[in-house]
Image (cartoon, rainbow, N blue to C red):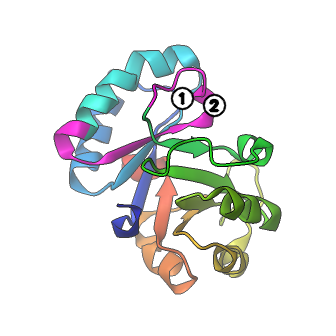
Amino acid sequence: MITEVNLIGITPEVIRDEDFENIKKSFESRIDLIILRFETNKEFNKHHENFVALAKDVDKELSINSRHIDQIPKNSNLHLNSKDLLRLAQRPISTSLLLGASCHNEAEVKQAKKIGCDYLLISPVYNTNGKEGIGWSHFKTLSALSTCPCFALGGMKKENIKDSLENGGQGVAGISLMND
């Protein structure tokens, strides 16, 4: 259940064979949920089944980024990017599945609440990849608007779980968490 999650990993957009072994170790030992987010549908098709088998082996959840919406098998957890989130009038999957969303502002958090998301990734908290960070104070403001667990994204490390908890979040998320 998402209420027991503190660390959400996000796959790199391209995965080499040696990356998969590191991701596997992280998922087995500390990552609670993985969001599959690949550069292309070809990458998704190449790796999806390996991740499904891994999740089953370690009895943990996967969520698939909405950029792969046309590839997603039925009965899959879904993670909405902010663009897809804003297009929806209602929840796109069953309430028996996990629905997450990436949010960057108040309008997106309100939309996620409206459609019944189960968790949010609020970002970027720190400056990353040319994006200006919103900081912990704004993270706290946005997470207070939500009725579901919120996770800080953007320059996060495992050590930032405490910062997230102190600012109304439940944990942290990121690509770098897969290799910590």
Q: Which mark is residue 38?
A: 1
Residue type at tag 1 = Phe
Per the image, label 2 sits on a secondary structure element best described as: helix
At 48% from the left edge and 22% from the top edge, which residue is drawn? 44
Q: Which residue is mark 2?
A: 67
Extreme residue in the left direction: 57
Q: Is residue 101 visible?
A: yes
Q: Residues within 10 Å of mark 1 (few under 14, many from 20)?
A: many
Mark 1 and 2 residues: CB-CB less than 8 Å, in contact?
Answer: yes
Q: From the viewer's perspective, is residue 79 above or below residue 54?
A: below
At 58% from the left edge and 27% from the top edge, which residue is drawn? 68
Q: Identify the magenta region.
A: 56-74
At 52% from the left edge and 86% from the top edge, which residue is drawn? 166
Q: From the viewer's perspective, is residue 39 above or below residue 119?
A: above
The mark nearer the N terminus, 1 or 2, is: 1
User: Residue 171, percent across and down?
Assistant: 46, 69
Q: From the viewer's perspective, is residue 135 above or below residue 17?
A: below
Q: Quadrant of residue 6?
A: bottom left
At 78% from the left edge and 48% from the top edge, which residue is drawn? 86
Residue type at tag 2 = Arg
Per the image, label 1 sits on a secondary structure element best described as: loop
Q: Is residue 69 magenta?
A: yes
Q: CA distance from mark 1 to mark 2?
A: 8 Å
User: Residue 175, percent across and down?
Assistant: 49, 46
Q: Is residue 121 magenta?
A: no
Q: Quadrant of the N terminus?
A: bottom left
Horizontal relation, residue 149 to residue 62: left or right: right
User: Residue 102, percent across and down?
Assistant: 65, 53
Looking at the rendered image, the disc whose residue lies closer to the viewer, 1 or 2, is: 2
Q: Is residue 153 visible?
A: no
